[in-house]
Image (spheres, helix red, strand yellow):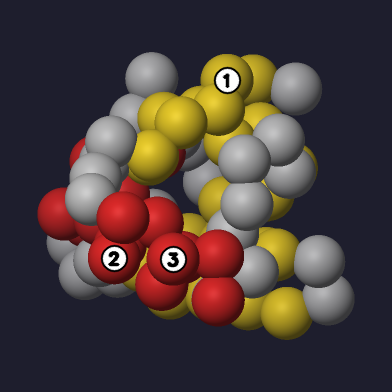
Amino acid sequence: MPLAMVSPGQEVRLIAIQSGQRMRKRLADLGLNLGMTVRVLQHDGQGPIILAVKDSRLALGRGVAHKILVEPC
């Protein structure tokens, strides 16, 4: 399921990024790699999605979040 469909408070594992090489590299530079677990902190249907990634927070636009496929942990 796309990351954009995950409810706040839920932990998920990244399984695929349906985008070009540039976007995959950009997300890897931000700390998002396949196989890692992230928690959705905020997702209210408007604005960015806030993720807990390791010891930091990351905001992603909803368009990018639709391209990231995840599975529940």
Q: Residue at x 34, y 30 (%)?
A: 2
Residue under numbered circle 1: 71
N-terminal label among 3 and 1: 3
Q: Quadrant of the C terminus?
A: top right
Q: Which residue is mark 2?
A: 22
In space, the residues marked 3 and 1 are separated at their CA atoms by 21 Å
Which residue is at the far front?
Answer: 21
The residue drawn where x is 73% and y is 43% is: 36
Q: Earlier in the sequence, mark 1 or mark 2?
A: 2
Q: Residues within 10 Å of mark 3 (few under 14, many from 20)?
A: few
Q: Position of residue 70 (x, y in %)?
A: 51, 28
Label 3, on which residue?
A: 25
> Is residue 44 visible to us here?
no
**What's under tag 2, amino acid-wise?**
Arg
Observer-side mark, 1 or 2, equals 2
- SS of the residue under disc 3: helix
Q: Position of residue 57 (x, y in %)?
A: 63, 77
Determine whether the residue tagged by mark 1 lies in a helix, strand or loop: strand
